[in-house]
Image (cartoon, rainbow, N blue to C red):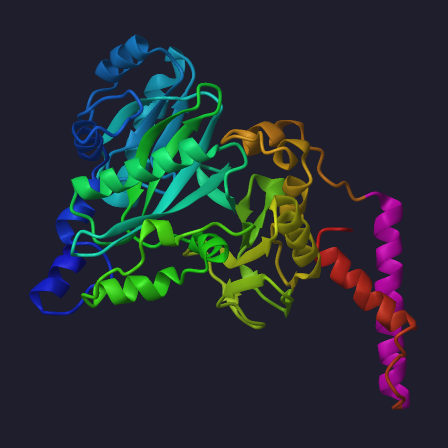
Amino acid sequence: PEFSRACDEEGIPFLGPQPHSISAMGEKTGARTMMEEAGVPVVPGTKEPLEDADKGLEIAKSMEFPVLVKAAAGGGGKGMRRVDEPDNFHDAFEGARREALNSFGDGSVYLEKYVLDPKHVEIQILVDEYGNGIHMFERECSIQRRHQKIIEETPCPLLDDETRHEMGEVALRAADAVDYVGAGTVEFLFDRHSQNFYFLEMNTRLQVEHPITEMITGVDIVRWQVKIGNGEELTLEQDDLERHGAAVECRIYAEDADQDFRPTPGTVVHLDRPSGPWVRVDSGVYPGMTIPVNYDPMISKLVTWGEDRDHAIQRMRRALDEYVISGLTTNLAFHEEVLTHPNFQDGSYDTEFIPDYMETRETASDEPSEVAELAAVLATHRRDEELQDESGGDSASDSGPSSRGKQYGRDRHRGKY
């Protein structure tokens, strides 16, 4: 909000909401109170930040476990702890406070009832300064690790049109409550058992996963964000929007799923991006670039569209198979695991999918015979190159050992070996 305010004072157009809107939605407990007053359903929880763990424990017991301890000034999964029983509450409370303070400079936390088996569904909105607003349908964001999304899709496979419409209307009501202007996202927890949904938070910005909404609507959200920021009127109306097909986004990270998704910073040695109709890669990474330890290790956003959900997923699997990144460990192979899992295939997955899956997941073990086979192919490849250098001969033919070595190398980087 300070930056937005500074731009306003200097007469510089800010491509985002006004300072008071950012502040209102950035402070989670205050936002919850405002949403309740606006008639937006919220998850049961405390309305004020908590300072004392003992007091928090009393409230948690009255709400019944499990509960979430959440940073009041937070986002992105930082300063958040799930607590399933009273004995673990104090450690979770203090841990959330420390992380919140380190991440946001504010150690305030609050409590929220944990909704069992929820789906994380969010609504994309556009609102101009003249009071015109639209919602652009939903995105399903339940595939998360450490409360951060790694796969998103639209539409949500278990949402009916009536609930979709109601959720969109509630999202616009939430935006109106804080005089919101620009592109933003209102996030909800969707109880797939009761079909109820609850306000979670509002992201007062353009989100990472906006391309899948662009894919199914044909609307350039970034262009409209710029136009609205320049004071232009939103000419799109709700009835103008239609959904076409389905889209999926995989966030490609330099991280190791076998090591609890630990970041794997390093230098990108080789890079082959997928391409083709309805395949989109948003990336700023190139061969020779170093993925640093200081920032989020996202390499790119891989997005595919299809005539229906199955088609979009099939296209994504093909794109993942074509994507080659060498020099560091990535989550390319893990995305393939998720996309082929029965719970993802039937759309029944929820926010606990990855934690539950990782408990039973069998990691690909390096059998001695497999390692030996790969080593033999690579050794042959290197020997051939040395012989060619010494003889000055032509490079190996496509059918020779050198070609096979390259293919094995590509497969290894995809996580196949």
- Left or right: where 220 falls relative to 109: right
Coordinates of residue 402 in the picture (x, y in percent): 86, 72
- Asked if the magenta segment contains residue 369, the reply would be yes
Coordinates of residue 398 in the picture (x, y in percent): 88, 75
Q: Residue at x 26, y 44 (%)?
A: 104
Coordinates of residue 408 in the picture (x, y in percent): 81, 61
Q: Note whether residue 406 is visible.
A: yes
Which span of residues is magenta-colored?
367-391
Q: Residue at x 32, y 33 (%)?
A: 200
Q: Quadrant of residue 81?
A: top left
Q: Main secondary structure of the magenta part?
A: helix
- Left or right: where 246 falls relative to 8: right
Q: Residue at x 86, y 49 (%)?
A: 370
Residue 121 versus residue 391 in the image, above or below = above
Coordinates of residue 249 in the picture (x, y in percent): 53, 51
Q: Note whether residue 26 is visible.
A: no
Q: Quadrant of residue 31?
A: top left
